[in-house]
Structures are given as C-alpha cells and as structure tokens.
Image: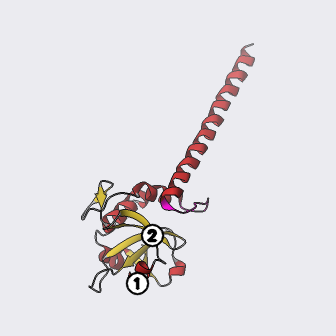
Amino acid sequence: MLRIFKLGLLFVIFLSFTGCHTGRKALIRQEISKAEMKLGLSISKSDPLHLYLEAASWVGTPYRSGGTSKRGADCSGFTYSLYQNIYRKALSRNSAEMYSRDCIRIRRKSKLKAGDLVFFRTGSQKQINHVGVYLKNNYFIHSATRGGVQVNSLNEPYYQRTYYRSGRVR
C-alpha cells in the first residue's frame, strides 16, 4: 500500500513538472508573439531571442537627450543600455566613439548579424552622430528624436542616404 502511494505521489510530481514546463513554453511563445508584433519581424528558433525580447521591451520609449533608461533614451544611451542588459558589455557613451573604440568594421551590409551596430551621419557635419542595433532582414532598432525607440529599415530612403558604416562589437 505504501509503495502504491509513493508511486502515485511520484506520478503526481511528474505531472506537475511537465505541466509547468508546458506552461513555461506557452508563456515563452506568448512573449515571442508580443515581440514579433512590436518589432514587426518574425522570430525563428535560430534568432537571438534574448536580443529580440529585450529590444521589443524598449519599443516606444521616448527620446531623451542623455537618457539611458526606459523613461527616456537617446540613440547611444539606448544602444549602451541594450548592450549592457543583454551582453554585459559597457560600450562608449557616444555613437562616434562606439564605432571607433568598440567595433570592428563590417564592410558589407550583407554580412550584418543581429546585434551588430549601424552608424549614420544625419546632420550637416560629416561625422557619425547616430547609432542603432541591427536586428535582421535590413531592420534595425534605435532611438530617434522623433518617435523615440523604434524599428526602421535600412532600405528607407532617409536611412539609405544617411547610412555610414556598420560595426561588430569586440
């Protein structure tokens, strides 16, 4: 009788663990679905899920010059915080310095991978003054003065015109 009780108890424990596992999978699928909606991208098993989930959590954060939090962030502050949260890497706090100090140049856009940095020269000055994080399929996430943290395509005319270079963080 005691043996049957122990087997029954083990069976109940086993079912509770598999139930939790199934519940966790459903929760993860739900989070992925939310991230896909926010980023406007489909996420596959081979994608860096940690990057996409963290990036999606920033979408809609307002632009704030000098900001590094979800209360408000500029482009380099957003990139700095994203890299700190995901990869535990401290980047420079300025887009031009990120390129020159923290990155290895990627010569062709076709070689970009999720997490690489994309740099722009958006003003009349001929220096890097904007940075974003590459996601996939020519899409990147960044904090823009108009709209805050958002996802855009490198194929949009404005970003085609202002794109300067890309870099892979060392």
Residue 11 in magenta stretch: no
Residue 20, position as x, y percentages in the image: 60, 36
Please tell me which residue is depicted at 56% across the width and 44% down the height of the picture.
27
Label at residue 161:
1
- Quadrant in which the N terminus appears: top right
CB atoms at circles 1 and 2 under 8 Å apart? Answer: no
Residue identifier under label 2: 152
Q: Is residue 132 above or below residue 100?
A: above
- Observer-nearest of 17 and 38: 38
- Give the residues drawn in magenta, as a range: 39-48
Question: Relative to 153, is 145 on the left or the right?
Answer: left
Q: Is residue 64 above or below residue 18?
A: below
Residue 45 in magenta stretch: yes
Q: How many marks?
A: 2
In primary-sequence order, the first of circles 1 and 2 is: 2
- Quadrant in which the C terminus appears: bottom left
Question: What secondary structure is the stretch in magenta mostly built from?
Answer: loop
Label at residue 10:
none
